[in-house]
Amino acid sequence: MAALPRFAMATGLLLSLAGCGVEPGPEDLRKLARPGSPNNYLICRSGLCAALADEDGPYYDLPPERLLAVVRRVAAAQKNTVASGEDPGINQLVFVQRTAWLRFPDIVRVQTIKAPDGRTALAVYSQSVYGYFDFGANKSRARSWLRAIKAELGKG
């Protein structure tokens, strides 16, 4: 009988965490200090972000404002995703995307960075709010967002 109350308490805790409001703000990806946990994934062009990126990000021959407009359209099409903040000074948009099953919040930051050659680089940082491991979820999310951005750019 003692197992049932523990199960109920654990279920209640998980459900309350899943409903927690998370309001992350912008954080300049060029100066990002990544945590030691493996529950995050950074895509950034080599030399443009202080933190070691997991993979190189793309360059675009577009002004930052146009690229961010595309990012907004892509984010609007993502399931369980809401805009959480933006910083025009660093050309960054911030989103919270909740997991499908338990609705845990994950943070997605997308930032355009002017490259020395005049092109616009795109950086994507996806991180879990809860948990130490993410079992590749942030890598999958960051890459999925990049694919969707590329596809959206191909439409115009």
Image (cartoon, rainbow, N blue to C red):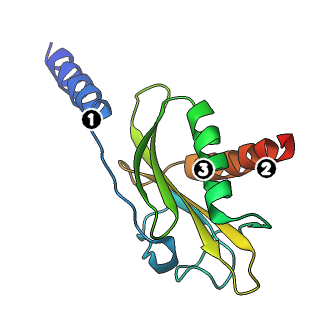
Give neighbour class at mark 3: few <14, some 14-19, many 20+ (Cα, 10 Å): few
Real-space Cα separation, disc 3 to disc 2, in angstroms: 21 Å
Element on which disc 1 rests: helix
Does residue 72 lie above or below 132 as drawn?
above
Element on which disc 3 rests: loop
Quarter of the image holding residue 89? bottom left
Does the CB distance between marks 1 and 2 fall below 8 Å? Answer: no
Q: Earlier in the sequence, mark 1 or mark 2?
A: 1
Amino acid type, residue under disc 3 in the picture: Gly
In the image, is 154 to the left or to the right of 108? right
Residue receiving disc 1: 17
Q: How many marks?
A: 3
How far across and down, in percent of the image, does residue 95 sit?
46, 46
Element on which disc 2 rests: helix
Q: Earlier in the sequence, mark 3 or mark 2?
A: 3
Nearer the observer, 17 or 146: 146
Q: Nearer the viewer, mark 3 or mark 2?
A: 2
Amino acid type, residue under disc 1 in the picture: Leu
Q: Earlier in the sequence, mark 3 or mark 1?
A: 1
Real-space Cα separation, disc 3 to disc 1, in angstroms: 21 Å
Q: Quadrant of the N terminus?
A: top left
Give the label on residue 7, or none. none
Quarter of the image holding residue 77? top right
Let me know if residue 17 appears in the view: yes
Amino acid type, residue under disc 2 in the picture: Lys
Residue receiving disc 3: 136
Q: Residue at x 57, y 79 (%)?
A: 49
Does the CB distance between marks 3 and 2 fall below 8 Å? Answer: no
Give the label on residue 150, or none. 2
Does residue 122 lie above or below 104 as drawn?
below
